[in-house]
Amino acid sequence: MSMTDELTLDVQALRAEFPVLGRKVHGGKALVYFDNAATTQTPKAVLDTWVDYFERYNANIHRGLHRLADEATQAYEHSRDTVREFVNAEDVREIIFTRGTTEAINLVAQSWGRSQLVEGDEILISRLEHHSNIVPWQMLAQEKGLTIRIIPVDERGELDMAAYRALFTPRTRLVCVAHVSNALGTVNPVSEMARIAHEHDARILVDGAQAVAHTRVDVQALDADFYAFSGHKLYGPTGVGVLYGRFSLLEAMPPWQGGGEMIKTVSLEEGTRFAEPPHRFEAGTPAIAEVIALERAIRWVTNLHFELLEDWEQRLLKHATERMKGIDGMRIIGEAPHKAAVISFVVDGAHSQDIGLLVDQFGVAIRTGHHCAQPLMHHYGLDATCRASFAAYNTLEEVDYFVDALQRVVTMVRD
Ligand code: PLP
């Protein structure tokens, strides 16, 4: 942060913390990394924390009495408390470590869903969900005879809130919605959706994978029953994620995986007594180093100040959107007024994959494909889009370089 005229992100200083951003690709071209919605890059502080664990206190947690086990356990549980504070959960027991968003949602489906839902119950899912907030529910619906109803999306990529309200019936038990759409960037009105869900005595699961690195999340203010996110989209490592669950719900949920760490006592004669949450849901040795590094990533991003971060990413989004609209034959998909820094686009007459490959030749990493959101792609009559997504370390110069490259690519494919 620079403290001169106004508080702004010192983006150049921040970039220096990311070794990978100094890379050259394709014959010496500077890497422009615009694939942040898939995975963010990792700052040195987080990498150092990960290495430090292995160099100084690599040990299994919870069961050991020796010094290293104690240090590892303390760091692991300290991470839980940092996550609690990060999402403003009331109680540290509401934070469960998982492998990522996908596993967090599967946990809810397999534990809460399997134990609480019965044949004929209904689940509302928005059309813009990532497959990981669709498929676990389809699997459960098939097993239990549930009905899935779809919250529609309009042309701009916003949820149709009137339709949402109208979808509730006395059998509606759960709403599944992304805080931010990975494919379009739409920020969904999740706190209003939670209010409406609760009026109907339904629960709400919010997929926060695309939100936590870009805006301040407060699960109590949102009134979310479950909130899921991944470390690797939050400047942290892969292989770790979080499920927040309201304690009153977690307390009543059965385990979904059995093994070590999640028990109180095991007897071959009398069976097993399970641990309380959160340990009930963390069977086996977890990703200890990754959980500890996630703690560092959360402190890193929090130190940027979310107000400054959001302001910066919105500047990148606005600048990129304005400039991209100047390219003939290019269409932006998803223009909700409230968007995160994600731009999906297609080029008339060209396959998205070709655009992605050609842009990559300029050193610019964007993503192409269905973005694990095929129902949303079909809504737009598309198989795929190109997607540029920004993070704290991206610059206006990078946006200009990308748009110039894109202009050349579009001219090339259309000639
Ligand atoms: N939900 C959304 C909105 C996502 O963008 C993603 C990843 O792209 C996921 C869920 C799945 O996350 P993970 O693969 O880390 O479990």
Image (cartoon, grey):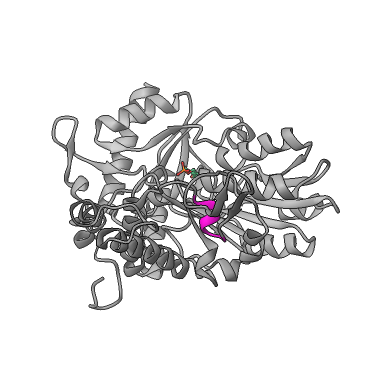
267 or 295: nearer the viewer? 267
Residue 205, compared with residue 348, is above or below; it is below
Residues 193 and 29: in front is 193
Q: Residue at x 32, y 69 (%)?
A: 303
Q: Quadrant of the N terminus?
A: bottom left
Check residue 86 for magenta coloring: no
Residue 377: image location, x then y, percent? 58, 34
Image check: 260 left or right of 396?
Answer: right
Q: Is residue 3 left or right of residue 162?
A: left
Of all residues shown, which one is farthest toward the top?
Answer: 415
Q: Is residue 310 left or right of residue 245?
A: left
- Please tell me which residue is depicted at 50% across the width and 30% down the height of the picture: 384
Q: Is residue 388 above or below residue 139?
A: below
Residue placed most toward the observer, 270 or 349: 270
Q: Is residue 202 above or below residue 6?
A: above
Q: Can residue 159 be seen?
A: no
Q: Position of residue 36 (x, y in %)?
A: 37, 46
Residue drawn at the location 70% of the way across and 57% of the way down: 203
Q: Position of residue 337 (x, y in %)?
A: 55, 56
The residue most toward the right is 170
Residue at the extreme left: 28
Residue 299: x %, y % from top left:
33, 66
Give the magenta range.
Answer: 276-282
| Nearest the eye: 185 or 123 | 123
Quadrant of the snapshot with the C terminus: top left
Asked whether the viewer can see residue 266, the reply is: yes
- Numbered-mark total: 0
Hey, which residue is sitting farthest front in the picture?
269
